[in-house]
Image (cartoon, rainbow, N blue to C red):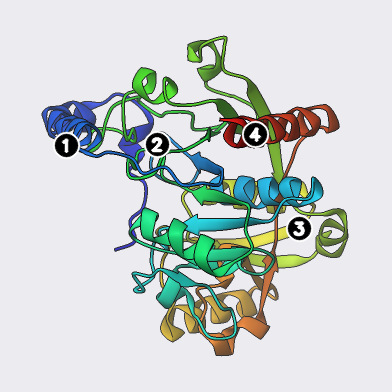
Amino acid sequence: MPLKTPKFWSALNWQSILLFPLSFIWQLGHYLRQKNTQPEKINIPIICVGNLTVGGSGKTPVVITLCRFLSGIGKSPSVLTRGFGGNKKGPIFVDRTLHQSSDVGDEPLMMAHSIEVCVSRERPLGAYHIIANKQADCIVMDDGLQNPTLEKDLKLAVFDGKFGIGNGLLLPAGPMREKLEDGLRNVDIVIFNGEDETDLTRKIPSNIPIFTGELRPDDEIIETMKNRRVFGFAGIGNPSRFFKTLNNIGADIVGEAHFADHHPYTNADMTQLYEEANQAGSELVTTQKDWMRLPTEWRDRVLTIPVRIHFSANDSIKIVSYLETTFKNVFSS
């Protein structure tokens, strides 16, 4: 069920203190699962992109960019994902001509525009399904740093630069899936989505390389949106980032609507949004991920803003070097 990120996760307060004892239950469950699960090793590299917090951090754009980097060095990646929000257990390859977001989830449907994507609740089954049915020479795992069922060869943790780790407490008192120090011991690379505004960098061990990317549309999208009157709506982990993007590219924002992450839009939702936008003399606009969850008959009436995570040329070269080293290590062992 879609949920909005609780505001109290951003700082220490009475609500987080009240829920703090329940965090020990979460921690115990995490510990037992890690201890009692033997990860499976497969014969091609697995590159895992995850986060240590729940909610939107920008994992999916990083997955897409890594796949682009891999293709650029002659590799053939396939994405492996749980398919959050979809009802298909898999393993199944996403087909945009057949599947809806209710089948496979909004993010897998979005990624399948340019990448082979396999949805599988059981990650090892998905990995073997990819190997058996596709000419893939590596797997990019979307989420799963805390999933112990597969052995990973390169692990990247993505943080939202504005949110960081919030109050730093474990679920449900805070947004952390595991303790920061425990999670970082299991990470090879850290990526910030936007500049680090919470001083989290100083808590990251010096042996872990840190890269900062900027989530923004391509130049041609920016040009078409300048001074355009829009009514924006979003149901993602951090909606404020989308509205900041609209503002940065010069759109004239006349209204906003916020929904829970992965909200399944109904005709009633869209009719109300359309009426509000129409009264303001504006057009509806949303994220690419939200657009995937719109009723099909509404998609032609809603603008979307595709974004990519952009790294500096120097950082891009370094990230590609880590990818190349991963292949060398896997196939030389």
Q: In this view, does 169 lie to the left or right of 318?
A: left
Query: Which label was assigned to residue 194?
Result: 4
- For residue 174, which quarter of the picture? top left
Callout 3 touching callout 4 (CB < 8 Å): no
Secondary structure type for disc 1: helix
Query: Which label was assigned to residue 181?
Result: none
Q: Residue at x 12, y 34 (%)?
A: 25
| Rendered-image quadrant of the N terminus | bottom left
- For residue 330, which quarter of the picture? top right
Label 3 or label 4, whichever lies nearer to me, is: 4
* First in residue order: circle 2 vs circle 1: 1
Front residue of 107 and 250: 107
Instruction: Identify the residue at the far front of this view.
Output: 332
Label 1 or label 3, whichever lies nearer to me, is: 1
Look at mark 2 in the image and give the residue it sits on.
53
Q: Which residue is drawn at 57% across and 17% down?
A: 208
Marks 3 and 2 sit apart, C-alpha to C-alpha, by: 31 Å
* First in residue order: circle 4 vs circle 1: 1
Callout 1 touching callout 3 (CB < 8 Å): no
Front residue of 286 and 316: 316
Front residue of 130 and 171: 130
* First in residue order: circle 2 vs circle 4: 2
Label 3 or label 2, whichever lies nearer to me, is: 2
Marks 4 and 1 sit apart, C-alpha to C-alpha, by: 32 Å
**Picture coordinates of residue 29, whole percent (x, y):** 16, 37
Marks 1 and 3 sit apart, C-alpha to C-alpha, by: 46 Å
| Rendered-image quadrant of the C terminus | top right
Q: What residue type is labelled 2?
A: Thr
* Image position of 176 with respect to 242: above or below: above
Look at mark 3 in the image and give the residue it sits on.
251
Q: Which amino acid does label 1 sit on?
A: Gly
